[in-house]
Image (cartoon, rainbow, N blue to C red):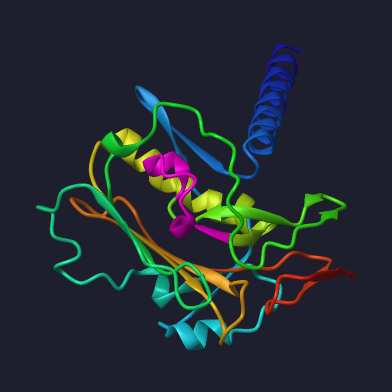
Amino acid sequence: MKKQTKKRRQQKKKLISTIIVAAIIAITGGSYIEFEQGGFDFLHESQQAKSSTTNKTKTELANLTYEGNQIVEINGNKTTFTEEELDVNQEPSQTFSDLDQYNRVGEANAVLNKSMMPTEERESLYIDPTGFKNKKISTGWLYNRCHLIGFQLTGENNNIKNLMTGTQSFNTPCMLEYENQVADYLKQTGKNVRYRVTPIFKDDELVARGAQLQAKSMEDDGLEFNVYIFNVQDGVTINYQDGSSKVN
């Protein structure tokens, strides 16, 4: 009887542990959590299904076909920064491209550091980037004013050179997922991250087909990604030429 009672207690403990782990996974949206002595680290795992491809030019990225995976890993998820761009002696900074002849944003670059992160809350956005013909859909607004370099990283906000028209899912969870990885690394290490966001337009269209995000920790190998995010929204057909749309 004692052995049976002990066995039932062990089975009960195992069941409770399983329930707790399942609850944690549900709360964190499917992310894994690794507990370590003195604290814990979140192991970032994409909530979006990913495919992969070799290194691509801007034109090749613009011509990629969306096949259900909104995030595509580029070049084996390895960045293409030069040695000069990863020079650890660089000071924290950010630069934005001038608008092109169609008033579209271009590539944004930064050497990020925790010291650049804002301490004040973000003000409301009021600048409309090209193609920002917004409309309500079943999950809210179709378009967001999307920062190339996220506000949480540098505090840059109503800057017309830093805002593009992006779908709801393009901005959240896709872009936000990678911005959060960078923000967490900066906060936890105090080290620098080389960062680049390149909006990908096709011909003279006013809405980007997507954006390429690259990040690499400069003093260690703690962080690196190179991904392309399709600027799409399930259930909606977008006219990238002018930003108009049709709910399917």
Q: Which residue occupies the foreground of this view, 46 or 140?
A: 140
* Quadrant of the snapshot with the C terminus: bottom right
Which quarter of the image is occupied by the N terminus?
top right
Q: Is residue 124 visible to us here?
A: yes
Query: For the image shown, how many numbered marks are present on the structure?
Result: 0
Kindly indicate the quadrant of the structure image that contains residue 244.
bottom right
Which stretch did the figure color magenta? Answer: 150-164
Looking at the image, the residue that sits furthest to the right is: 248
Query: Within the magenta stretch, is there residue 228?
Result: no
Q: Is residue 245 left or right of residue 101?
A: right
Q: Position of residue 26 (x, y in %)?
A: 69, 37
- Image quadrant assignment for residue 213: bottom left
Q: Nearer the viewer, residue 231 or 218?
A: 231
Extreme top residue here? 2
Residue 154 on the magenta span: yes
112 relative position to 55: left or right = left
The image shows residue 235, relative to residue 205, as above or below, that is: above
Left or right: 88, with 27 as reference point: left
**Residue at 74 percent of width and 64 percent of height:** 233
Residue 172 located left or right of residue 211: right
Q: Residue at x 57, y 84 (%)?
A: 204
Q: Quadrant of residue 201?
A: bottom right
Q: Residue at x 64, y 38 (%)?
A: 25
Residue 50 position in % (x across, y down): 58, 67
Q: Nearer the viewer, residue 182 or 123?
A: 123
Along the line of sight, the residue nearer the viewer: 156 or 32: 156
Question: How far from the left and from the top, in percent, is residue 8?
Answer: 74, 20
Question: Is residue 194 in view?
Answer: no
Residue at 58% x, 51% y is 127
> Residue 246, percent across and down?
86, 70
